[in-house]
């Protein structure tokens, strides 16, 4: 009985000390979680970096998706009529017949006949300049542009060519469209996978930071819990703290990403007249995200702040459930 009484006295003494510690901190109007600490500043830096990289990844995926849509639109509107030279064939007459058939087909907006020199010039990137190609059977080309607001009526065009220029070959670039779709889809999926990995890494960092903050305030949390403080009250202290940290880091990272895309847009416009710049603009556009892109960056930054708060609240609740 004596030992039991002594043990009870020691437990009561420890409980009293813990209560006094909690009351002391509450009397000084100190928050349960310190508003500023080295760990908090480090978490803000991590969230800012992850948000910056996530926004870059999401923005890059949006640029590729937008550029691929433009490629598909341009290529689907253009078809090529090809006439191969052969012995006994009047190529010029075949070109005139094919061009007339294309102009008479419904849905055709523009027909451009390439001259012999134009067709040979298309081979210069592969064969080099200054070569005499007069002895080679270089195909003659006609580029046909379909109307923008109407679906290409290739069946009617094929019928007109078959009737007036049966030796002409119509290429609708379906193979290129298929490859562009596959490439663009692969890039977007890869970007989404990287984005998901960054979010997971950020959640892990938030989890470690929350557990560290709870470990530093373990005695206070346990005292508040045992004296009857609601779990929602304790979790709100951590949720508010980490919401502020998450919003701060998310907005810093989002602002840095927005400045990056603004700088890339200006640099792309400045170098658009150079050969390399023209190719980059042709592939990715002018690196212009547009208003929707910047709204998406801002929304992502805010969402990361709330994700930080939700993650910390979930971890705190799990910890408090174990104290029951």
Image (tube, grey):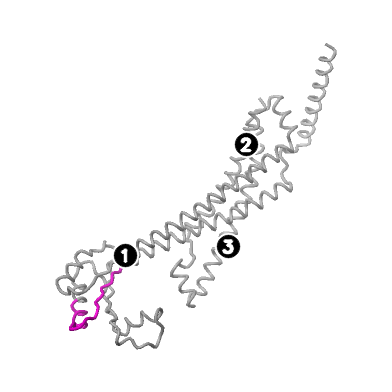
Report whether 219 appears left or right of 238.
Answer: right
Report whether 262 appears left or right of 71.
Answer: right
Comes first in the chain, label 1 or label 2 = 1
Separation of disc 3 and disc 1 at Cα?
35 Å
Which quadrant of the view contains residue 80? bottom left
Q: Which mark is residue 76?
A: 1
Is 75 magenta? The answer is no
* Number of marks: 3
In the rendered view of the protein, which quadrant contains the N terminus? top right
Comes first in the chain, label 3 or label 1 = 1
Within 10 Å of the Cα at label 3, are there few (<14), some (14-19), or many (20+) other Cα atoms? few
Residue located beneath label 3 in the image: 259
Residue located beneath label 2 in the image: 315
Comes first in the chain, label 2 or label 3 = 3
Q: What element carries label 1?
A: helix
Separation of disc 1 and disc 2 at Cα?
52 Å
Residue 182 coordinates in the image, percent (x, y): 39, 59
Q: Name the residue located 53 percent from the left edge and 49 percent from the top edge.
A: 196
Name the foreground residue: 178 vs 321.
Answer: 178
Q: Name the residue located 70 percent from the left edge and 37 percent from the top edge.
A: 214
Residue 204 coordinates in the image, percent (x, y): 62, 44
Q: Residue furthest left?
A: 163
Is 86 magenta? The answer is yes
Q: Name the residue located 35 percent from the left edge and 65 percent from the top edge.
A: 176
What segment carries the magenta color?
Answer: 78-97
Q: Determine whether 172 is above or below 54 in the image.
A: below
């Amino acid at each position: 009985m004596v030992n039991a009484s002594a043990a009870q006295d020691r437990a009561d003494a420890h409980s009293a000390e813990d209560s006094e510690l909690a009351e002391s901190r509450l009397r000084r109007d100190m928050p349960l979680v310190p508003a500023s600490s080295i760990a908090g500043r480090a978490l803000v830096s991590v969230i800012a970096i992850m948000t910056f990289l996530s926004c870059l990844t999401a923005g890059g995926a949006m640029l590729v998706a937008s550029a691929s849509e433009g490629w598909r639109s341009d290529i689907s509107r253009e078809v090529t009529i090809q006439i191969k030279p052969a012995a006994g064939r009047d190529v010029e007459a075949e070109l005139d017949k094919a061009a007339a058939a294309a102009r008479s087909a419904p849905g055709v907006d523009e027909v451009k006949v390439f001259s012999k020199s134009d067709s040979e010039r298309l081979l210069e990137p592969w064969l080099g300049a200054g070569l005499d190609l007069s002895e080679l059977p270089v195909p003659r080309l006609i580029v046909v542009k379909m109307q923008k607001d109407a679906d290409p009526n290739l069946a009617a065009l094929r019928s007109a060519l078959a009737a007036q220029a049966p030796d002409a070959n119509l290429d609708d670039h379906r193979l290129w469209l298929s490859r562009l779709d596959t490439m663009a889809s692969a890039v977007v999926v890869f970007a989404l996978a990287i984005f998901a990995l960054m979010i997971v890494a950020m959640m892990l960092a938030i989890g470690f930071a929350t557990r560290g903050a709870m470990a530093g305030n373990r005695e206070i949390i346990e005292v508040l819990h045992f004296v009857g403080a609601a779990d929602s009250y304790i979790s709100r202290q951590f949720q508010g703290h980490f919401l502020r940290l998450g919003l701060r880091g998310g907005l810093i990272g989002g602002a840095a990403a927005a400045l990056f895309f603004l700088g890339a847009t200006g640099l792309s416009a400045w170098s658009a007249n150079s050969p390399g710049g023209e190719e980059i603009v042709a592939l990715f556009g002018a690196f212009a995200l547009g208003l929707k892109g910047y709204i998406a960056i801002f929304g992502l930054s805010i969402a990361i702040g709330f994700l930080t708060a939700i993650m910390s609240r979930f971890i705190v609740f799990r910890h408090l459930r174990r104290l029951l």
